[in-house]
Amino acid sequence: MSNTFFSYGLIAIPFVSVVIIMAIRALYPKPYPDIPHNKDSANRVSGDIPDLVPLITATNEFSNSIFRITTQKLGTPIAQFLFPGIRKPLIVLEDPREIEDLLLRRNKEFDKAPMALDIFQPMFPKASLAQYTTPELKAQKRLWADVMTAEFLHKATAPRIHKATLELVELWRLRISVSNDKPFAVDEDLQNTTLDAIWVSILGDEAGIIDHSIKKLRNKIGGSIPFDATPPRGGFLRDEVRYISDTIARISNTPSPKWAGKFETYTPRYQRFRSTVTREISLLMAAAIKRFQGLDVETLNSGDTDRCMLDLVLRRLVLQSRKNNNAPLPDPTKDQNMLDELFIMLVGGHDSTANSLCWFVRFMEAYPTVQSELRTVLRAAFPGPEPPSAQAIIETNVPYLDAVVEEGFRLAGAAKGNLRQAVVDTSILGYHIPKGAEIFMNYHITRPPVPVDEAKRSGSCQAAADKHGDGLRGRAGYDLDKFEPRRYLVKDIDTGKETFNHYAIPSLAFGGGYRGCAGRKLATLEFRIFVSLLILNLEFTDLPEEMRSMAATEKIFRQPDMPFARLKVL
Ligand code: HEM
Ligand SMILES: *[C@@H]1O[C@H](CO)[C@@H](O)[C@H](O)[C@H]1NC(C)=O
């Protein structure tokens, strides 16, 4: 008996040891072969995480911390971030040309990554941000594509954004009058402005948030001016959108955003969000449909009555039913695809833009010569005395203004890090990338790229450089950490005239390709109107030393830690 036990034991000991060794080994990071990584991190179970955590704690910037301890530390254009072995490494890519190529020209090889979709999936499963590129998604994108055409934006959206911006100018004039030449915080005003702008652009309804702030401040200054203290129509919206932004930021910082998101959908707060916003949107939808049902086919076809994005989408639904012998109209207020897309556009479309504008305000203070050159150029283009109309701002060719807008998005880096997943076995910069690998890319170009052997680049990337040149190696690529709009301007040697070159350097602030930002044209329009009206009406003067920091905190978007301005009325 004891003999048998003994011999079993002899077999069991090595067996157990092998199992333990294998289990421990499974916990160690499993780097992809050849792709550069930190050797020390490969030899510990926790991988790169112990280097990452203190950096994030010190800087509040998640994406930048990943780049700093991988590509930037190793001095390579591509590297990998090592997780414990239960999770595959993250491939990190910092080369702007290769990123642009991957986004624009390699859509068959790379799609959205699970890690990116997981953040939105539980709460907004039918929003485009939560879906892989499927036939269903393509149909959804077609439905919304026309609301972002230049023609539609100029006709229906620009005047509304123009009005919202003039209200901000008015509010800031009032703030200046009571500020005693002291700086004041601008971040909330910018968020309120972009909310007004996005709500009315999408839904055609005035949220009245800035208007309310104006009246409140006037009342405070004037004392006797009567003031209706009931919150603005859009007050609820601000709370709801804020709740969603904060929730997305919070769950994206948990180990499992998918489960954290799923959990959130069961909370009363989430249910309240859904019911409140759906109720408001449904009212607007019902009114629009009623209006369209009263129109004849010819008027419906023309689209002349569209006042906002929702109008266009609903008008098409009514038209379709009319053409199908008055087939019953699907109820859009129950259409989850439509509601989810609307929610995401409201949330994503206002926070991103507000943050980019906030950075712009910081840049104007930090680069006074750019500010005065911009004002000179704008005054020449729009002599006044009235502020230029939305149409004038859109249609007047002002290359320096184009350049300021592009440079503003670039240096703001509101959306810094973004993900894709390889859907086939492929390669990047000569390294094998297996199907399923996730790639984390830097959309914020602030430093000269590490040199890359041209032959290692993809064929399409090389071809693009043959066409547009490699701008980052030339004049346009100097001082990438500085705000320098001139990098996008090209002077004609014969006429001396300057033109804006959109291809001067890669443009990554909105991602790109089929899954790039759906709201890019809207954001660009908004930025252009904002920049023109603000610079013509107000001067951004210097801030005290302690407010000049360009430090950022990255939540969903990168936002400045010092969102202050000191302003003068012109
Ligand atoms: C300055 C403002 C903005 C910035 C910096 C920005 C940036 C981005 C980025 C980086 C992406 C991911 C692209 C990728 O994966 O390559 C994205 C996606 C998206 N954005 Fe924006 N965005 C802005 C404004 C807007 C606005 C105003 C709207 C809508 C009204 C909008 C709607 C969307 C949508 C729907 C997607 C998802 C597209 C898809 O998954 O196919 N964005 N945005
Ligand atoms: C922004 O709007 C909300 C809702 O009306 C208001 O409570 C808040 O005070 C506004 N922010 C500023 C800085 O005026």
Image: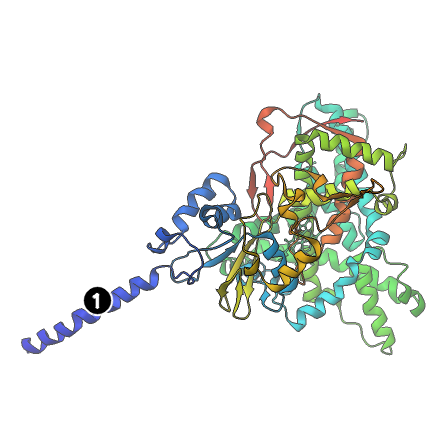
Horizontal and vertical percent for residue 331? 75, 69
Color style of the picture: rainbow
Which residue is situated farthest in the front direction here?
494
Question: Does the closest atom of ligand 1 sit within 8 Å of the Cβ of label 1?
Answer: no
Horizontal and vertical percent for residue 213? 74, 36
Residue where numbered disc 1 is placed: 17
Q: Does residue 231 show up?
A: no
Q: Is residue 96 above or below residue 496?
A: below
SS for callout 1: helix
Of residue 523 and residue 202, the one placed in the foreground of this image is: 523
Query: Which image quarter: residue 364?
Result: top right
Q: Is residue 491 above or below residue 114?
A: above
Label 1 crowd bin: few (<14), some (14–19), many (20+), radius 10 Å? few
Q: Is residue 98 above or below residue 382?
A: below
Please name the residue shown 87% across and 64% down the image: 292
Q: Does residue 161 show up?
A: yes
Image side of residue 561 versus residue 192, left or right? left
Please name the residue shown 42% across and 42% down the image: 54
Horizontal and vertical percent for residue 113? 55, 62
Image side of residue 124 versus residue 280, left or right? left
Query: Which image quarter: residue 271?
Result: bottom right
Q: Amino acid at mark 1?
A: Ser
Q: Which corner quadrant holds the N terminus?
A: bottom left
Q: Is residue 168 above or below residue 329?
A: above
Q: What count of labels does the image hold?
A: 1
Q: Which corner quadrant holds the C terminus?
A: top right
Image side of residue 295 versus residue 511, left or right? right
Horizontal and vertical percent for residue 21? 26, 64
Quadrant of ligand 1: it is bottom right
Of residue 350 and residue 455, the one placed in the foreground of this image is: 455
Query: Which image quarter: residue 327?
Result: bottom right
Of residue 232 and residue 429, the one placed in the foreground of this image is: 429
